[in-house]
Amino acid sequence: MLQIYNSLSRRKEPFKTIEPGRVRMYVCGMTVYDFCHLGHARMLVSFDVIARWLRASGYQVHYVRNITDIDDKIINKALQTGSSLKDVTQFYTDAMHADEKALNVLSPDSEPRATEHVPDMLDIIQRLEQKGLAYRASDGDVNYAVRKFEGYGKLSGKTLDDLRAGERVAVAGGKEDPLDFVLWKAAKEEDPEDSRWESEYGEGRPGWHIECSAMSRALLGIPLDIHGGGPDLKFPHHENEIAQTEGAFGGQMSTFWMHCGPLMVNDDKMSKSLGNFSTIRAILGKSESLDDKVATYEANPREAEMLRFFIVRNHYRSIQNYAPQNLFDAQNSLDRLYQTLQNVPPANVEIDWDHPQAKLFSAAMNDDFNTAGAISVLFELASQANSSNDANLSGLMKSLGGVLGILQNDPEAYLKSPTRYGSDNTQGNLTKDEIEGYIQKRNAAKQERNYSEADRIRSLLHDNGIELEDKPGGVTQWRYR
């Protein structure tokens, strides 16, 4: 039975859905004002794998991941670039979708935008005001009265005296308590026209936290089966969502709360505020220039899958460290799996979940989505397939890899794709035609018993990052190291 670590209870629990066979999962998505970095990639890939495994387990999943398209950072980017909010958010939404495509992240079933649900947000704010949990401040904002909600802090495990206002929420002079957070922000004179909505509270825009309470209820209803997000969302964002939703409607907002672990750079979490981040597209060798105003790109499939593999081979809740050497190691490990698919062409098989290795894979995934354990099963299958030359074993390895969103590229095309993350990172500028030409010359030299010339060509190709493998029948395969 699937066990999931619940951030609310701080322990693993058997997964039981509100409605049999159906999963309602909401994950907090991107604020679209800049390119996604590797910390975002970890969240995107982790919950993609979770949704894939739930579906592979027979659940009907409605996966919602929102887009925050109204926010102070977006307004600042629009003012800096002289663009409209719509132009800014559409550009970075397109960029996010390009990153998702590169990482083989499937689109969520619903992708609501905050600006589409402002009336739903206002409805919740009115309910909170009627219940005495929200108040109109002297500066025109509407704030949530944190100390009036019993149980505030139950997700983060903090007491009220421990808590501080969230960094993403500007401290307003009209607050009755420093812990209170804004639900509706009164418009300022300098705010762009497209950042204002009319309401009974005057012109303004929603606060950050209220949007997810509104969108999750509008698309999925409450309670949710799973609510998830990145590690920094537990407090204040998710804590405030609970206060808003449960304060307005009673009951429980979500049965399970899930948070992926942080991506670290040395001793600090990768984040834009610290400036220690690397964007997805930069890791994939793509431009971050805004000059051409093109957000989409085609990724090198080998490097893109390496990046997904780098994330998936670690448990989603673990602390993961980013360093170039870790990317090299991920590339080399993934290459070994593809070399098995090339050497033992896989049979087209459906997964037999009674197979011993499939059982181990399932047991790992049912243990709180333990992808690290699942990946170890793939390497065991690769070892067995290589030693027995069994196409059914390599076929099972490929099919199980598909559950994780990996190993679906053509192995020959994959291994002939250049990569900057190989074992020695040494690759010359030979074209594929030139490589094939050298291989033909080497084969001719071998036929003429000119082994010194054949060895010279092998060494030349090796120095250019090309690895050769002589197969039965005089066939020579090559791949980038």
Image (tube, rainbow, N blue to C red):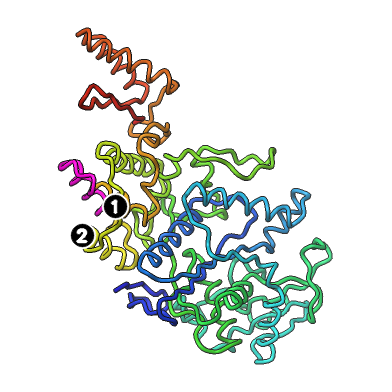
Q: Earlier in the sequence, mark 2 or mark 1?
A: 1
Q: Nearer the viewer, residue 373 or 33?
A: 373
Which residue is at a point 53% across and 76% down the rendered structure image? 239
Q: For mark 1, does the 10 Å Cα neighbourhood hold few (<14), some (14 to 19), or many (20 or more) residues? A: some
Q: In the rendered image, which quarter is residue 476 located in?
A: top left
Which residue is at a point 32% across and 72% down the rendered structure image? 2
Percent across and percent down for residue 77 are 71, 53
Prevailing secondary structure class for the magenta stretch in the rendered image: helix
Left/right of residue 43 with respect to residue 403 in the rendered view: right
Left/right of residue 306 with respect to residue 184 in the rendered view: left
Quarter occupied by the C terminus: top left
Which residue is at a point 40% across and 26% down the rendered structure image? 427
Residue under numbered circle 2: 355
Q: Nearer the viewer, residue 247 or 139?
A: 247
Left/right of residue 260 with respect to residue 211 in the rendered view: left
Determine if the magenta segment contains residue 386: yes
Extreme bottom residue here?
A: 131
User: What's the amino acid at mark 1?
Assistant: Val
258 over 41 or under it: above or below: below
394 over 269 or under it: above or below: above
CA distance separating discs 2 and 1: 12 Å
Query: Which residues are the magenta region?
Result: 377-393
Percent across and percent down for residue 314 are 34, 55
Q: In the rendered image, which quarter is residue 55 located in?
A: bottom left
Percent across and percent down for residue 428 are 42, 22
Q: Secondary structure at mark 2?
A: loop
Q: Secondary structure at mark 1?
A: loop
Q: For mark 2, does the 10 Å Cα neighbourhood hold few (<14), some (14 to 19), or many (20 or more) residues? A: few
Marker disc for residue 297: none
Extreme left residue here?
A: 388
197 over 83 or under it: above or below: below
Marker disc for residue 349: 1
